[in-house]
Image: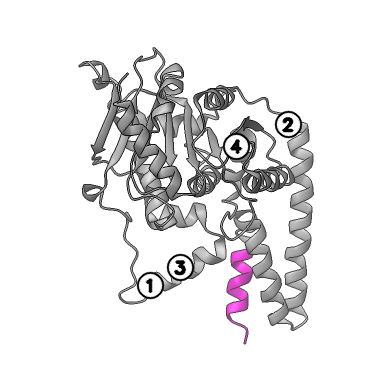
Amino acid sequence: MFLRSEIVQAETTALVRQCYRPRMPARRLLLLAALSMPLLAAAGDAPIATGLQRDVIFTGYSPLSRSSELVRRLLSPLNALRISQESMRPGHAIREQPLDLAHEKFAVYLPSHAPPHGYALLVFVPPWPQAVVPPVWTSPLDRHDMIYVSAANSGNDADVLDRRVPLALLAAYNIMQKYPVDPQRIYIGGFSGGSRVAERIALGYPDLFRGALLLAGSDPIGSAQHSLPPAPLFRQFQDAMRLVYLTGRNDEDHLDMDTRSQQSMREWCVFHLDTVSAPWSGHEVVAPGPLNHALDLLDKPVQPDPGKVTDCRAHIDQTLATQLQQVEDLLANGKPDAARLLLNKIDLHYGGLAAPHSSKLAEKLATRP
C-alpha cells in the first residue's frame, strides 16, 4: 500500500460527513498534443515516484483557464456580453488568469504501473475543502493506470468560475505537462456538489475531457447554471463525450437528479450515457467495486449514431430558428419589451447555439427605449 490507510480513511470519513474510444476529432488531438507534448520525453529521463503526493504546487498556466475562455465556454452569449461591457468600466478589468497558482495546493495519486501508451487522468472536483484521495479508490486507480488529481479549497463553498473550474483545468494542464498522459483517456469527475461542477466543465470543455464521472450529483443542461457552449463545442460534446452516472442505491434524492439530467441530455441529443448503481450505499464515497465498473465504462469507446444525432439536431435547430424569428417579428411590430423577454428566455435555454444571432438581436434591442 502507498497510503497509511487508517489515517487517510479517517480523513475520508470526515469529508463525507462534511458534504452530508472511437477515433478522436483531429482538432482535439492537436489541442491535446500541444498541451501534453513538452515534457513527454522528459518523463522517461528519471524514475517516477508513485503513490500519494500531498501539497503539490503547480506553476503552469493554460490558455483554457483564461478568464475570457471561461466566460466564452461557460456563460450564455448575453451574459458574456454583459460581462464584457462591465469589464470596460474603470476599475472593473478582468484578470487574464483568475488564480495565482503559488497559493494553491493539490493532491496527486500516481498509479503503480506506467502504461506504454500513457496514463489515464481523472481530474476530481470535491465537495470538501481538502485535497485528498479517498483511500479505497487507490486500487481501482492502479487497475486503470489512472492518475488522480484534486485541488484544495475547491469545495462547495468555493466560487465556481473563479476557483473550482480553473483549478480543475490547471490541474489537468500541469499533470499533462509533467507525465505522459493518453489524450483519449482524460476525464473530469466529482462527488455531490463537485460532480455538478464536473458536469459543467465537461459541457464547456469537450475538446479537453473525453468523459465525465458524475458521482451523486448532476443537473439538466440548457439552464443558467449549465449554459450550452458555442455550437462547435456542443457538437463535440454530443458526438464524443461519455457520461457515467454513479450514485448510491439508497441516495434517492440524487438518483432523481440523475434521472432528470439524463432526460435532459437525451433531449439535447447527448446519447452516450451509462448508469452504475452502488448497492447498499447512500450519499457517500463509493466502494472500489462500483468505481471499477464506472471507470471501465468511461474507457468504453463511444459508438456514434450519425443518423439519430442528425435528426435530433434538426429538430432543435428548427425550434430555435422559429423562436429567433419571433423576436425579429416582435421588434418589427414595435414590441421591444416582449422581444427582450423572449430573447432572454432563448439565451437561457439555447446558450451558445443561439449565437451570433442572439447577440445581434441584443445589440438591436439596446438601441430601443
Q: N-terminal of the two: label 4 or label 1? A: 1
Q: N-terminal of the two: label 2 or label 3? A: 3
Q: Are marks 3 and 4 in contact (CB under 8 Å)?
A: no
Q: Amino acid at mark 2?
A: Pro
Q: Position of residue 8 (x, y in %)?
A: 33, 33
Secondary element under disc 1, as helix, strand or loop, is loop
Does any portion of residue 127 appear in the rendered image?
A: no
Q: Amino acid at mark 1?
A: Met
Distance in Å between CA atoms under marks 4 and 2: 33 Å
Q: Could you tell me which quadrant the C terminus lies in?
A: bottom right
What's the residue at 53%, 27% (across, down)?
Answer: 291
Closer to the camera: disc 4 or disc 1?
Answer: 4
Which residue is labeled 3 in the image? 83
Secondary element under disc 3, as helix, strand or loop, is helix
Direction from residue 272 to residue 191 in the image, left or right = left
Closer to the camera: disc 4 or disc 2?
Answer: 4
Direction from residue 274 to residue 148 in the image, left or right = left
Closer to the camera: disc 3 or disc 1?
Answer: 3
Q: Could you tell me which quadrant the N terminus lies in?
A: top left
Secondary element under disc 4, as helix, strand or loop, is strand
The range drawn in magenta is 358-369
Distance in Å between CA atoms under marks 2 and 3: 37 Å
* Up/down of 233 relative to 162, above or below: above
Q: N-terminal of the two: label 2 or label 1? A: 1
Which residue is labeled 2 in the image? 306
Q: Position of residue 109 (x, y in %)?
A: 34, 28
Does any portion of residue 139 appear in the rendered image?
A: yes
- Determine the main secondary structure of the stretch shown in magenta: helix
Which residue is labeled 1 in the image? 88
Q: Amino acid at mark 4?
A: Gly
Distance in Å between CA atoms under marks 4 and 1: 47 Å
Which residue is labeled 4 in the image? 248
